[in-house]
Every structure is written in C-alpha cells, then in structure tokens.
Amino acid sequence: MRALYHPQFHRRAPDVLIYSADPPDPRLWTVRIDGRGDRCMYANPRDQWFVHETFLGRTDRVAVVSWHRGIREVDLSSGAIHPLAALLLLGSVTRAASAHDRQCVGMDLRLVSRSSAGR
C-alpha cells in the first residue's frame, strides 16, 4: 500500500487524479479513483527535486517545480517533459531562522518566461 500526497483531480476527467507518492522519488503518479491505472507518469532522477505539481488548466499537462532548475511541463499520458519557465533565485536571505526570536528565512523569487530565460 502506498500513501497518496497532494491528490488533485483532473478538471476534464474527474475519475483521474495525480498525486505524489511516499517516498517521493519518483514523485509524479496518476491513478483512477477506482484504483485502476496506478502508474508513475514521470520517473524523475533522485537529483531532480520536484515540488508543487498542478494540472495546467483543463489539459493533460502537469506543471511541476523542479527546484533550482525551473518549472517543467509533464504530459500525463506520455510522460514527456519540457521546460515551461525558468525559476531564478534573486536577492539574498534576509533573516536566519531562530527559535528564540521567531525570525524566519525570506527570499525574493522571480518567475521568468521561457523566451527570456538565459538572457
């Protein structure tokens, strides 16, 4: 038996969902609500850290953050993966975490479109 984390229903096919598994490598899985078709939709390597996946509107494509690499688009049926956007970490850490004064870490994140990435 596998735990299902972050389940999300497909907007056009309400009997299909995506989820992340435990352990999260690979992270991206899909299954029908009756348990049929449980499969890994993309087997990310262990050094490709995926977080925060979601369907792209009413399509069969899933957007997923590939941490430190950008946002990727994964096709639900084929598992084909393509860059969707670059994720650049700009700025610096503003505060360090501290149990005594309850400060936290803050960063400035900026999303850059695929056409302007690398410029």
Image: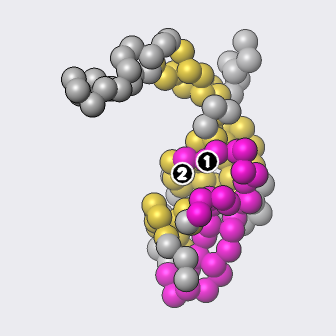
Residue located farthest toward the left when viewing the structure as drawn: 101
Q: Is residue 32 found left or right of 49 in the rendered image?
A: left
The residue under the point 51% across, 52% down is 54
Residue drawn 68% across the image and 74% down it: 39
Q: Is residue 49 above or below residue 78?
A: above
Main SS, magenta residues: loop
Nearest to the observer: residue 10 or residue 102: 102
Colouring: secondary structure
Residue 31 on the magenta span: yes
What residue span does the magenta drawing correspond to? Answer: 23-51
In the displayed structure image, the side of residue 104 where residue 86 appears, left or right: right
Tag nearer the camera, 1 or 2: 1
Residue 74 visible: yes
At a point 68% along the width and 18% down the height, the residue shown is 116
| Residue neighbourhood size for the residue with mark 2, other residues' Cα within 10 Å, grouped as few (<14), some (14–19), many (≥20) | many
- The image shows residue 72 at horizontal and vertical percentages of 66, 42
Residue 107 image position (x, y, % from top left)? 44, 21
Q: Report the disc number at residue 30.
A: none
Neighbour tally class for label 1: few under 14, some 14-19, many 20 plus, Cα within 10 Å: many
Q: Which residue was labeled with disc 2?
A: 53
